[in-house]
Amino acid sequence: MAVMRWPAMAALLLAGGALGAVIHAGYARLAAPDADDAAPAAAAPAQDNGGLVVDAATQARAGLAVAALAPASQSEGTTGYARALDPGPLAAIGAEIESARAAAQASAREAARLAALAGADAGAAQREVESARAQARADAARLDLACQRVTFEYGAGLARRGCGAVETLARQAAQGQVAILRLDFPGGAPQAGAVVQLDLAPGTAQVRVLGPAAAGDSQLQSGGVLALLTGPQAPRLGVGRILAASFAGMGPVRAGVMVPRSAIVRADAGLFVWRAGPANRFERVPLEDGRADAAGWFVPVGRLHPGDRVVVAGAGTLLGLDHAAPAPADGGDD
């Protein structure tokens, strides 16, 4: 057997030692990551009983911005219902008005013609003149009665549009361009000109009150008002359809806050905001008893108060971090 010389054996041992050192260093690196690898894990968001904890660096990367809630007040409003009325009787009234108007105009011209002949001694007897004038007055009275039928059968609110508008309104209703509504509120009827919101399910619409209806509601024992719904939503209101209605002109005033729309997050079948607290904590606060408003979302004072700081930018990112963060420990002794 060949004998290995010492210089060759020494080189082999040195090479093996260097390889072992490399392998040992590799295992050491896997077992204990360096500071650069450990930093992101330490900065991960976490949940505790006080809410979601997010460090400042993560907030900056997520583009979080907070704003203080402004105080607001709003009337509780009054709720009721709206019912679409049958425009058929209005069309019949319109036809009667047109017929009475034509007869009144014809008899008035005849009376004027006979009076002119009698004045010129052209063969018209005074008795004929008086008879023609009586007929003209009778036809004018029938026209006036036909116009008053709008008040008797629908109400003064619709009659305020004038006798000449009845035929046009009936024609528009027949074509689906307008719907005639009766609005009833147990707490009292709104004044003429008040804006009422209708729940069309789906969607909403606003109408302006014309004035009182002809009769009270037998069930609610309330005096109704009339309104007109025009536009593309009018054909959706079949005769007799009942809609929820509300207006904010009555009721006690509630104190609350106005939540910006950018702060609202929809999740878990509800709406909530993230309220910023001390020590980089963010708490989910549900919007209870809120009401949509042109400026945002009105929420009565309760869970939220004026001056509370809520997230207005990056609220959706916080929701994702909340779902990804580990749940807090239950504190048990298991």
Image (spheres, rainbow, N blue to C red):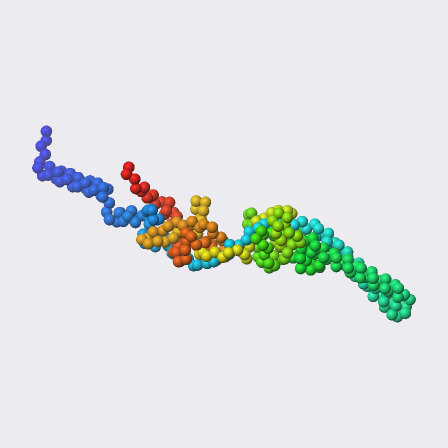
In the displayed structure image, the side of residue 27 where residue 72 appears, left or right: right
Query: How far across and how far down the image is residue 134, in percent?
Result: 83, 62
At 47% from the left and 58% from the top, the residue drawn is: 73
Residue at (68% x, 51% y) in the render: 87
Q: Do we see residue 234 in this rendering?
A: no
Among all residues in the image, which is located at the extreme top? 1
Name of the residue lying farthest toward the bottom: 120
Residue 24 or 15: which is nearer the viewer?
A: 24
Position of residue 58 in the picture relative to residue 12 (left or right): right
Quadrant in the rendering for residue 138: bottom right
Q: Where is residue 63 shown, x and y percent of the image?
A: 37, 54
Is 310 situated left or right of 32 in this image?
right
The front one of 169 and 210 is 210
Q: Is residue 17 visible?
A: yes
The residue drawn where x is 80% and y is 62% is: 137
Q: Position of residue 281 (x, y in %)?
A: 34, 51
User: Residue 154: horizontal and vertical position, in percent?
Assistant: 67, 53
**Quadrant of residue 133 in the image?**
bottom right
In the displayed structure, would residue 113 be above or below residue 209? below
Q: Residue most toward the front?
A: 221
Q: Residue at x 64, y 48 (%)?
A: 218
Where is the C terminus found, in terms of image quarters? top left
